[in-house]
Amino acid sequence: MEIQDFTVTLMPAEHMVNPQRGLILSAHVQLVRTSDRNVLDDRMVTDELGPALELNNWMANHAARFREEVVQATQRLAEAIVTDYFLAYHFPERVLPGFTMDTHLKGLRAWSPEERPGIPAGGVFGSYIEHEDIRAKYPTDEIPDLFSPPIPNEFRIAAQRSDSLQPTLKWESFPGTNVTYELKIWRSGRLGPETLVYSRANIEQDSHKLEMTLEPSTLYYWSVRAHFSMNGRDRITDWSRRSVKSSLWLKIMGAALFPDPIDEGFYVFITPQPASQGLQPAATQSKWFPWGNWPLSPPDSERQEQSTK
């Protein structure tokens, strides 16, 4: 195996002045037969799970955050190379048809918290997130348009509220020998999964109750994969992912002019609001776009100010 052209990029996330930049690592990997130097496989392997930050945040304190994230991303990239070449068991893509949107699955299906792609009957937010949740964070003149940023697509058409800050996650069981499961949960950032907050391996059941309390009113990404044995070899399935695309009916009606609603990514859910905390009037809220803490919890600095009052 030859690994070449290792690159580290801070890729702008948006077309704007001083955009947030996501950390992307990639490497050119070839599998070469030594007897005749015949190239059996040739591909680029990429890691894009790093956070998105403004350039001054990446470079602060002698680029401490940048150097820390590069180390973690390098470890993830190395794991991805080993898994892809020697351990991976790739599911065929499955399609769950819907009237307006089809869900394309890779890996194990999520059972709970369930995702239901589509605009809910109660409105764009419906049972997913209430208008009051948005109004609690924005003054009236800053409530974002229902179909515009900063609300991620996953939030408005796929994510369901979990029933607890320590939810039990359930997924499709995998038929095989010596099956165990590996679970990871990330807190959402501006570009998607940003901070890994929970990781467990060697789970023997097709469900797991979290052993820590998550933050309330927060969007999380999660994924699971199965470890198993096949012909005496250890194998690993792909991390569970899904994309949401317009159905054939919607394309016939003209939706082909628009991009698919959700690109391929991990599953999402929203934690419930704190039961003891009432919503604050909009007039008392600071004016900020809650990307890093999306959707409802204020930035750390604001929480600290509130706690000292």
Image (cartoon, rainbow, N blue to C red):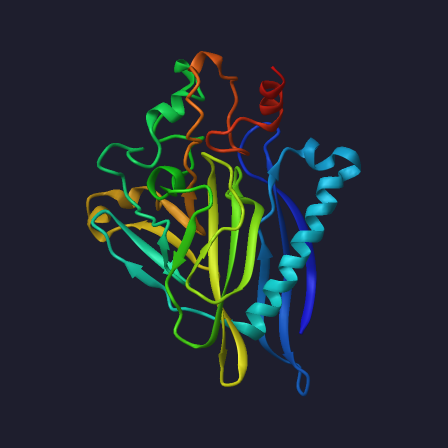
Q: Residue 140 in the image: x percent, y percent?
A: 39, 14
Q: Position of residue 115 (x, y in %)?
A: 34, 48
Residue at 43 percent across and 39 percent down: it is: 271
Number of marks in picture: 0
Residue 144 appears in the picture as rendered: no
Where does residue 17 sit, x and y in percent of width and height? 59, 27
Left or right, 70 with respect to 309, comes to right
Q: Is residue 284 left or right of residue 49?
A: left
Q: Quadrant of residue 194?
A: top right
Depth check, front residue: 114 or 194: 114
| Residue plotted at (41% across, 36% down) | 272
Percent coordinates x, y for residue 151 in the rendering: 42, 33
Name of the residue lying farthest toward the right: 62
- Occupied quadrant, residue 60: top right
Q: Residue at x 41, y 30 (%)?
A: 275
Q: Nearer the viewer, residue 257 or 171?
A: 171
Q: Inspect this view and state whether residue 127 appears.
A: yes
Residue 31 image-quadrant placement: bottom right
Pick out the residue farthest to the front: 276
**Could you tell whether 282 is left or right of 15 in the image?**
left
Looking at the figure, which quarter contains the C terminus? top right
294 vs 27: above or below: above
Q: Indicate whether 10 appears above or below 43.
A: above
Q: Is residue 153 above or below residue 266?
A: above
In percent of the image, x 40 and y 70: which residue is there?
174
